[in-house]
Image (tube, rainbow, N blue to C red):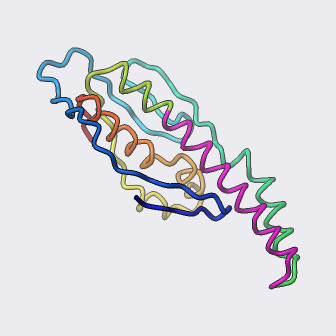
């Protein structure tokens, strides 16, 4: 059992349990293959022409985060007011991360359920983040998080994921 605590003070317990269900063997014959291209205007564009809009969670939350960050910086170090302001900022960041993760879970579930194999474009995000004009938008898109979710969901269902 692993206990973890978030910055907002929430505790999570993680248990590893053997449910007795065997991991499915990857399918031998593949009927439906989907290619996925990652982008910024559209988070993903698949080979069927379906485009998934980039929700831009950071852009939506930017004003709120900026306001809370400013309030925190105005507080005196070590004060209770600063601790409260820091907690509000941490909750806003956690809400942003949860919204992004929820969207990625729903999109990855849809892609894996509808196809037997998914081919994903792999990008060198580290190099792309060097571009100062695009770095914030690339980080907000969180391509790696989406690919991670696709990876473990495809393994759980015995489907193929090609990077």
Left or right for 125, reference 25: right
| 143 or 16, nearer to the observer | 16
Could you tell me residue 37's position as x and y percent?
40, 35
Percent x, y of residue 155: 26, 36
Q: Is residue 27 above or below residue 162?
A: above
Residue located at (70% from left, 47% from top) = 59
Total numbered labels: 0
Quarter containing the N terminus:
bottom left
Per the rendered image, the range of residues in magenta is 78-105
Residue 78 occupies which quadrant of the picture?
bottom right
**Looking at the magenta stretch, what is its main secondary structure?**
helix
Queried whether the magenta region covers residue 4, the answer comes back as: no
Q: Residue furthest left?
A: 28
Quarter assignment of residue 94: bottom right
* Residue 26 location (% of width, % of height): 17, 29
Q: Position of residue 84 (x, y in %)?
A: 82, 68
Q: Nearer the viewer, residue 137 or 2?
A: 2
**In the image, residue 136 above or below residue 51:** below
Q: Is residue 16 left or right of residue 146?
A: left
Residue 80: quarter of image = bottom right
Above or below 24: residue 91: below
């Amino acid at each position: 059992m692993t206990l973890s605590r978030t910055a907002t003070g929430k505790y999570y317990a993680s248990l590893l349990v053997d449910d007795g269900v065997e991991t499915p063997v990857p399918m031998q014959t593949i009927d439906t293959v989907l290619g996925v291209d990652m982008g910024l205007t559209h988070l993903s564009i698949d080979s069927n022409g379906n485009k998934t809009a980039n929700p831009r969670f950071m852009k939506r939350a930017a004003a709120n985060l900026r306001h809370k960050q400013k309030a925190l910086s105005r507080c005196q170090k070590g004060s209770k007011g600063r601790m409260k302001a820091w907690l509000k900022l941490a909750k806003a960041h956690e809400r942003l991360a949860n919204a992004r993760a929820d969207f990625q879970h729903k999109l990855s579930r849809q892609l894996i359920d509808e196809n037997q194999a998914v081919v994903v474009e792999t990008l060198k995000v580290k190099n792309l983040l060097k571009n100062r004009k695009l770095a914030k938008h690339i980080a907000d898109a969180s391509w790696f998080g989406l690919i991670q979710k696709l990876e473990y969901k495809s393994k759980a269902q015995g489907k193929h994921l090609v990077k």
